[in-house]
Image (cartoon, coloured by chain):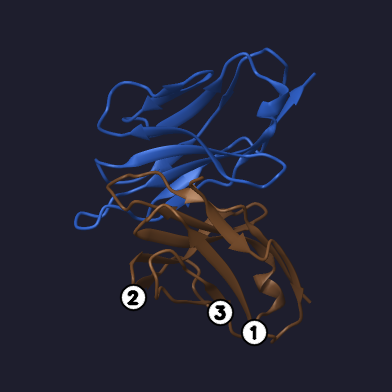
Chain colours: A blue, B brown
């Protein structure tokens, strides 16, 4: 079974600074997908970024980027120029696709609570 | 607007009183799933459905039932709720393609007394 570990329960950073959230996972699969979801105080789960394991290039979405190290099974999220609206719980998640159907469950880490300080 | 909706958003009930949390999506997605979120545990999958009339257990299915009679709806049923089912529940859907992103509903906060 896959496991996802987020070793930083809480983090805080000054507005406009850069912050990196760590995530490691354990799997024997070679093909899989990784996600970062953001959960603001509204509790809504919002997709931040998605990475396909077979792609060498790290995914980026505006101020959000990842550092994907497949051999080390590491998938960290970097937030640049942090904003007050980035205050949220961040979840790292792993998905192993099924061969005949396509989708399997997301396995989530326990989350990192990020606070952006004005 | 493409979305996943859940009802109710908040629910307080008592032990043993059957309840249903509804989930509906308007994206014609084949894959739907239920998760529960508990402090310190992240989100864990309860049940999922690959298509109409096709459902299967996730990691924590005990005490829950689901059905998928229509493509757009995937209700979660608690036949006899207990206090350990107090949690935040999310429904999610995706197109079902390999590695496709799952889109989440707004969540249902359930308190079982």
Chain at numbered mark 3: B
Pointer 1 or 2: first along the chain: 1
Q: Are marks 1 and 2 on the same chain?
A: yes
Mark in front: 3 vs 1:
1
A94 lies left or right of B87: left
Q: What number is the disc on residue B53?
A: 2
Q: Which residue is mark 1?
A: B18
Q: Are marks 3 and 2 on the same chain?
A: yes
Q: Are marks 3 and 1 on the same chain?
A: yes
Chain at numbered mark 2: B
Q: Give the vertical position of A63 relative to A11 (above or below).
A: above
From mark 1 to mark 2, how far is it between C-alphas?
22 Å
From mark 3 to mark 2, how far is it between C-alphas?
20 Å
Q: What number is the disc on residue A91?
A: none
Are the residues flagged by discs 3 and 2 in contact, CB closer than 8 Å? no
Within-10-Å neighbours for mark 1: few <14, some 14–19, many 20+ = few
Give the percent coordinates (x, y) of residue A110: 58, 47
A14 lies left or right of A3: right
Q: Nearer the viewer, residue B97 or B40?
A: B97
Q: Which residue is mark 3?
A: B63
């Amino acid at each position: 079974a896959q496991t996802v570990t987020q070793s930083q329960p809480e983090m805080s950073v000054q507005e406009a600074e850069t912050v990196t959230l760590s995530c490691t996972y354990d799997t024997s699969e070679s093909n899989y997908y990784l996600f970062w979801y953001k959960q603001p105080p509204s509790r809504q789960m919002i997709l931040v970024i998605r990475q396909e394991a077979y792609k060498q290039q790290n995914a980026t979405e505006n101020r959000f980027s990842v550092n994907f190290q497949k051999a080390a099974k590491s998938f960290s999220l970097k937030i640049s120029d942090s904003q007050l609206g980035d205050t949220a719980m961040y979840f790292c998640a792993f998905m192993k696709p099924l061969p005949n159907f396509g989708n399997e469950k997301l396995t989530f880490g326990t989350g990192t609570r990020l606070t952006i300080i004005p | 607007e493409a979305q996943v909706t859940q009802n109710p958003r908040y629910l307080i009930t008592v032990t043993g009183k059957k309840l249903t949390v509804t989930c509906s999506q308007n994206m014609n997605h084949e894959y739907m799933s239920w998760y529960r979120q508990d402090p310190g545990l992240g989100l864990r999958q309860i049940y999922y459905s690959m298509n109409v009339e096709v459902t299967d257990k996730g990691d924590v299915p005990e005490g829950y039932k689901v059905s998928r009679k229509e493509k757009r709806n995937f209700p979660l049923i608690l036949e006899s709720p207990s206090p350990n089912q107090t949690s935040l529940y999310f429904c999610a859907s995706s197109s079902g393609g390999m590695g496709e992103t799952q889109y989440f509903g707004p969540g249902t906060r359930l308190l079982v007394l």
